[in-house]
Structures are given as structure tokens and as C-alpha cells.
Amino acid sequence: GAVVSQHPSWVICKSGTSVKIECRSLDFQATTMFWYRQFPKQSLMLMATSNEGSKATYEQGVEKDKFLINHASLTLSTLTVTSAHPEDSSFYICSASGGHGYTFGSGTRLTVV
Amino acid sequence: ELKVEQNPLFLSMQEGKNYTIYCNYSTTSDRLYWYRQDPGKSLESLFVLLSNGAVKQEGRLMASLDTKARLSTLHITAAVHDLSATYFCAVVTGNQFYFGTGTSLTVIP
């Protein structure tokens, strides 16, 4: 149980375009979802926390208008990287919490060219 | 802000040897997790430690928690190549995760 599906696993996009990453809890209701970014050989950095039906809470230094987070249902949260630039290239990981603990998605490798 | 430090950052060890990874954190927390991450992959949960003195073991890995010292350890016994990965501790306060810096472990034959 407690499976989180993250899609896509990897994506390459052109600079200036937008990319959407989905995070779904498959067998539980995720009241809270977290989005992390991880640069090579570094730790995970929390970008934002979202509760179902509420606006996301962003960490200091994370641009709200660039990283749009939507948590419209108890099983789905999306992260949209708008007007992506090469410096946004990173590994993005979601995590979902639903009372059982925390489950991490499989991650999305974003490369902006 | 809660800070979580791991050491060492890099660890190269021979197969069959024992070693310990340390995780120090700066304020009280609700629980502590240990994760493993393989290159290009997400996190694999290893242990969750909930109380002072908690000890958990799985195979060649054993984790412990001392909440008074704000210290957790991940002990590796008789290392094998398959244990090569990056290990993270993470401290949870409220609903917030704080990850350690990570320890990149390489086990050499």
C-alpha cells in the first residue's frame, strides 16, 4: 500500500516552454503533498507544501509564479514549471502524506535545453 | 530553522568492514527517517525512528536514535557492494521534513 505515482519520469523541454509534473496517490488520500528539488550530488530541498483545496505554501526563495502548484483533489497534485530555463534543470520529487506516514514519488528528471 | 547534519559526506569502505554514519539535528523533532537513494532514483525508505532509544535493524543496516543528544546513527555491518548508494536522514517536526546533507557510500570489493 501507500503508493505514489509521479509522471513523467523524465522530460526534456526547450527554454521558455512550460512543463507539468503530476503526482498521484494511488491507494490513499493525500491530505498534504510536498514538492522537492534535488540538484546533482545535493540533498533534497523543499520547494512547497500543498494541502488539498488550499493554496500552496512556498519556501523562501522559491518563485510562486514560476513553480505553480495545484492540489485540487486528495489524490492529485501538479507542479508546473513555467517559462523553464536551463537553471531549472533538476530532479523533482513529490511526497504525499495521508496519515500513514510519508510516501515519495519516483521523481522527474527535468532537462531544459 | 531546524538544521540536519550528516557525516561523513563521502565514505569509501571495503567489503566486509563496519562503519557508522552520523546524523545530528539542531532542535527537538517528532521522528527521524533514514532513506537510501540510488543514482537517478527517488528515495527508498529504510527506517523510521519514533522515540528515544529506538533501534531498528534490517539486514546489514541498523539505525538508532538518541533524542537527548539529537543524534541518530546508521551502522553498516560487513558491507557489501550492493549497499553502495547515498543515504539521507530526515527529521520531521510537525508536518515538515528536514533532510540531512546525505552520505555517499561506496563499497569497494
Image (cartoon, helix red, strand yellow):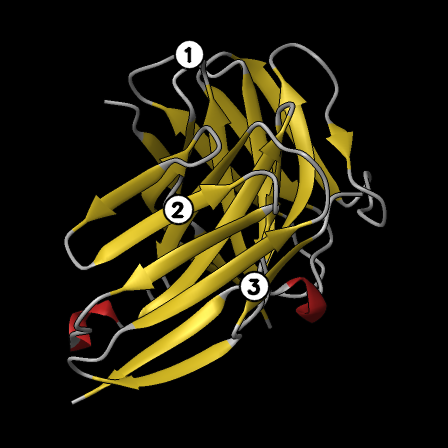
Q: Estimate how packed mark 2 is, as few (under 14), some (14 to 19) or many (20 or more) residues with alpha carbons within 10 Å.
A: many
Point out residue A25 in the picture as x, y percentages from the top left corner: 38, 23
Mark number, residue B64 = 2
Task: Residue A24 in the image: state x and y as whole percent.
Answer: 41, 27
Q: Mark 1 against mark 2, which lies toward the viewer?
A: 2
Q: Which tag, 2 or 3, sits closer to the chain's start?
A: 3
Horizontal and vertical percent for residue A35?
59, 39
Residue wearing tag 1: A29
Q: Which residue is mark 3?
A: B6
Q: Amino acid at mark 1?
A: Gln
Residue toward you, A1 or A79: A1
Total numbered labels placed on residues in the image: 3
Q: Which mark is residue A39?
A: none
Residue A96 versus residue A80 in the image, above or below: above
Picture quarter with the C terminus of chain A: bottom right
Identify which amino acid the numbered label 3 is placed on: Gln
Chain letter of the residue beneath label 3 in the structure image:
B
Residue B39 seen in the figure: no
